[in-house]
Structures are given as structure tokens and as C-alpha cells.
Image (cartoon, coloured by chain):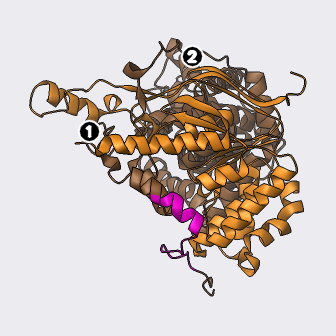
Amino acid sequence: MEPPEERPPSSNEPDSPDFDVERRWVKRANRDADAFVTVGDDGARSPGEDEQLIEEERLHRVIPRVKPRTTEELETQPPPKQHYPTHVGEALRELWATREVVLTFVERDLRVRYKQAALGAFWAIVQPIMLMVIFSVVFGKIAKVGSEGLPYPAFSYAALVPWSLFTSSISYATSGVVGNSAIIRKIHMPREIFALSGILSSGVDYAVSMVILIVMLAFYGIYPAVSWIALPVVLAVLAMLMIGVSLVAAAVTVYFRDTRYGIPLLMQILLYATPVAYPISKMVGPCERVAGLTQPQCGVLHGFWADAYQFLNPLAPIMNGFRRVMAHGQWPEWSPLGVAAGVSFVGMCGAYWWYKRIDRTFADVI
Amino acid sequence: MSSEPRPMVDVENVWKRFKLGERRKGLTKKRTLAGQLTAAMERSGLKGGDGGGAISNIWALADVSFTVGEGEAVGIIGPNGSGKSTVLKLISRITDPWSGHIRTRGRIGSLIEIKSGIHPELTGRENVYLYGTILGLSRKDVRKRFDEIVDFAELGRFIDTPVKRYSSGMEVRLGFSVAVHLEPDVLLIDEVLSVGDEAFQRRCLARMDQLRAQGQTLVFVSHILPDVQHLCPRVVYLERGVVRIDGPSDQVIAQYIQDVNARQADRGRP
């Protein structure tokens, strides 16, 4: 690749006469601009001063500057804060009108992700595979948690694929909002676009992992079954949950960057609270006699808590549903999945409404 | 009244408050652990503070009203810190005001800082599509104007080179060329006509003249007074968040120059 022939214009660009006249008076007016710039909150540079210096450098002239007006300096009493209503319908219409932007962002994210990394898609799919290998050794061979009669690698990978979709969509959505802060500060568009495009671009990685899962199942002698037609249903429930959680995570990250450390930790806890590495019966199953053991084997949660678990962790029936549909060739357990769908839907609507309520001033704080 | 052009932008009694530092720092000091610790140390006398510590508010805009009629070009001038860019942000709905109303008609196109939408890893061609859609063009529109955009930017054979290999001048020209081909109902320009080399600046001004001749409604924020005077018959002079004068450009600009010089003279005294 030959380098571009041109370089940025040198800073001592020739003065045109009309620009020169103006520059002289502005310069005179600002020779000691610092004298009346004392806005800094810790005695150091005031906010925006660096930007001003850059701007002056770019314009080749000194810019007059004033202290912003504080509340004490107002000539009249400021009005109370006005609350502007949140119209979800209008927001959805606007989102639909900008659907091309969402697709452009997805395309950009994928291009950038696969252009920069030498192994492209490899990094996106290697994570669930590594977890599968670790789980196969730790839970399959050492702890022997059981795998519902399936080969353990197929058992765990069938749930790890949707699991990694869930976690990566949240991390892409969060970094999408913060990573595009320059755009949020400068250009108006529905701000949920950045979260949604993160979710969609993680869906592409998911598709690749899905192909690997199908190959792997075939390797263990598990071939496509009628139950696979239920996959879109389970996927839809997961999608609603992902959208809700991603919007909340992204909005919180705008205000508190702590989520960068908090979310991965939370995901790790959730991974072990969800039947991904172990069968769901270990968590909520009824007691069963197992050959060779004197004590009956029970789930750790009973009665009320076993029921509450389905509400509190909608991921459990979703992950279990994925495994049943893909690996067991069975229908999902409809009633827990239905509960999860309800929880996810309400969560998604609530999260969207809340996001639209606060996203109008993201540009001020991000 | 009937001779008045219908308003395209109507800014009515708009107030905008920022917490000090909020605009750039993400969080005010009070809300981070580090900020809390510093404040606690100052209170207990371990560390000398500036005595303050209370979050102070600044009013970027305090009761600002003006309208921009169809086909009108209005310049906004004023020293930095007067709320010029905030006005544009509110018109383009990047953020909401504290109180007041902003009504706009038609599609608002912002020609704000160029770099935000451009991604260094992508090629010039990919970036034209990316930036175009971000600014509100459909992919079809971009495709239709693609050659025009590339010609205006004078990128030629570098269009399939990743933007990270561009010189800063080329990058700015790329972004700007997309932006001037937007053709919105109201075009907002924030201090960007001064980008690139002088030849490119002249071409941008010429393009603006052309848009003006076609009846483009414009709101133009700039420190370069000759450009403002050239492009805008009417100027709004903002000072510390209030409209100081709103009138014909030569009068308003003369007043502005007088104010700046007077302030300088004040400071000249011992």
C-alpha cells in the first residue's frame, strides 16, 4: 500500500489579508485570556479549555471567551425543570425510520471486528468452545454432575452457545453505547440504536457457533429433529431478555463506568446459577433414587424456592429449553418457558420505557 | 404577518442547565468514590480545598428565544462559553432543554464536528456510507450521490484505502463532503467551514453559497466573522447564555467587536 501523497497543511499557512485583519483584533482582545478564565473546579484548567486550545490551533486564531453564567448571576429566577413526556410509540416509529442506521452499525461492527483480528470469527466462537472443554473436564470427568444421558461435551455446548449469545450481546451493547459517545454527543439519533446494533452483531457470532453445534451433535450421532422448529420460540424469549438487560446495562454504564467490572462478575455468578454446566434437575428436580447410591438425589431448591427460581432466573428455562430442543429432540418445558417469556417481555418493555426517559440527556453526561 | 416566511426553527424561552464539569467529565465529583474521599478529606481538614465543594450549576442558555424562517440564513456569534453550540444541540435534539420549547419543521441536518462518525479501520468508501447514514441519508441516497461526494473530497484513487492511512486533511474533506451533500430542510453548521486547506475552505463556502441560492435554511455558528457576514444577512449575538442582540449582520458584528475590545480595555487597567 503506497502512502497517500498529501500531508496535512502546515500550520504556518499563508495569511490572506482579510483573515489577517480580524485575527489581529481578536488576538489583541485575548492576549491575556487566562485573566478572566477561572472556571476550573479544582483550580486547574477549566472544562473546555483544552478543547479551546485545539480549536484555536485549528482556526489559527484566538477565540474570545467568557465565564459561563452561574445561578447567582441570573437576571431572573430560573423556571422549574420542565418534564417532557416520553412517547414510546413515537420512539418506536423513529427507531423504525432509522432501521438502516442500525444495519449500518452492525455492518461496521462486524467489518471492524473481523478486519482487525487475524483470526476473525475465531475469537467469537472460541470462548464457548473453551468453556465446553473446561466444563467437560471439571464437571463431566471430575465432579460428574451428570448430563441427562447425553455425551457431556454435547450437553454443555448446547447450552453454552445461547449462553455466550446472552453475555456477548450485553457486552457489545454496553460498549456500543459508550464507544459511540462521540456520535451521541454530536448527532441526534435514537440512542437505543447503539445497544440494538450490539445485540444484532453478537447474533452473527451466534450463527457461526450454531453451525459448530450442529456439526458436533452430528458427530455424537444426534441429527436434526422435529423439535428444532421450536428453536425460534426459545430464541425469541432469549432475545426479549437480552434487549431488556442490555438496555439497562447500557444506560447504567452511561452514568457509572463501574459496570465494566461489575457486569463480567455478574455474568460469572449467573453462569453458575443457571443450568448450563449441570442438568436443571440438580437445581430444582424432584428426589430420585439412583442405582449404586443409598441416598436419593435431589435438586438443591424445594417447594416455594424451586418455583421462585423460574421467575427469578428466566435464563434457566431458556437454557434448558435450548438443550431439550437441540440435543434431546424434545419440546421445551412450556410452562416455565412461558413464565420466562412473560418476565422477559415485561422487563423488555419496562427497560425500553426507562431508557427512552433518560436517554434524552445522555449527550450531557456520557 | 403574511409576508413573514413560515418558521422552520422556533426556539421559545429555552433554558439549559449544566452541572459544572458535567459536560465533559461524565460524572460530577460528588458521585464518584474518589470525589467523595476528596470531599471527606477536605471536610476533616486533612487536605485544603477550594472551600467550595458544592456542585455549582451553570446556565448555558437563560431564556433564549428566536426563530429562523424558511429560506433564512442566521448566524450565531458570541464568545466561547456563551451557549452557541448548545443552541445547535437543542435544535437538532441531541439533548433536551431544562425548560422551554423548540419546534422544528422538516429534516434537520447537522454539520457538526466531522470526526465523530468516521471509523479509521474502514475504507473511504465504507465510511462514506457509514457517515451518510449516520447523518440521516438512506443508503440509496448515498449511492446516488457517491461520485459527487468523492469528487468534492478530491479523494480519487484513495477511496478504497482505510481512513487510518489518510492525512488529517483528507479525512476532514471526506467527512465534510458527505455532510454538504445532505440537503436537509434546515442545515446546522457548527464551526466547520474552517477545515482543511484554504482551497477546500473556499470550495466549502462556494457550496454554501450555492445552497443558499437554492433557498436552503441555515443556522451557522462560527468565530470567523467574515464568513458569517458573507453567508448570513441576520445574526444572533449570544453572550453568556442570553441573546444580546438579534438583527442585521453588520450592526450585530460591529457591536460584538466593540464588546470584545471594551472587555480587553477593562482588563488592561491595573
Question: At which x and y percent is residue B10?
Answer: 73, 27
Residue at left 62%, top 25%? A351
- Rendered position, A354 above or below B256: above
> Does the magenta portion include A18?
yes
| Chain letter of the residue beneath label 1 in the structure image | A
Query: Would residue A65 be visible to someone looking at this image?
Result: no
> According to the image, label 2 marks what residue?
A307
Q: Amino acid at mark 2?
A: Asp
Left-right relation of A265 to A120:
left
Question: At which x and y percent is residue A246?
Answer: 59, 36
| Residue B154: quarter of image | bottom right
Mark 1 surroundings: few (<14), some (14-19) or many (≥20) residues within 10 A = few
How far is disc 1 from disc 2 in space, using C-alphas?
54 Å
Which quarter of the figure is the C terminus of chain B placed in?
top left
| Chain letter of the residue beneath label 2 in the structure image | A
Q: Which residues are magenta?
A: A7-24
Residue B262: numbered disc: none
- Rendered position, A237 above or below A6: above
- Tell me the shade of chain A: brown
> Does the magenta portion include B247?
no
Report the residue that reaches farthest toward the left. B46
Left-right relation of B49 to A101:
left
Mark 2 surroundings: few (<14), some (14-19) or many (≥20) residues within 10 A = few
Among the chains pictured, the one given orange colouring is B
Q: Amino acid at mark 1?
A: Asp
- Contact, CB < 8 Å: mark 1 with mark 2? no
> According to the image, label 1 marks what residue?
A42
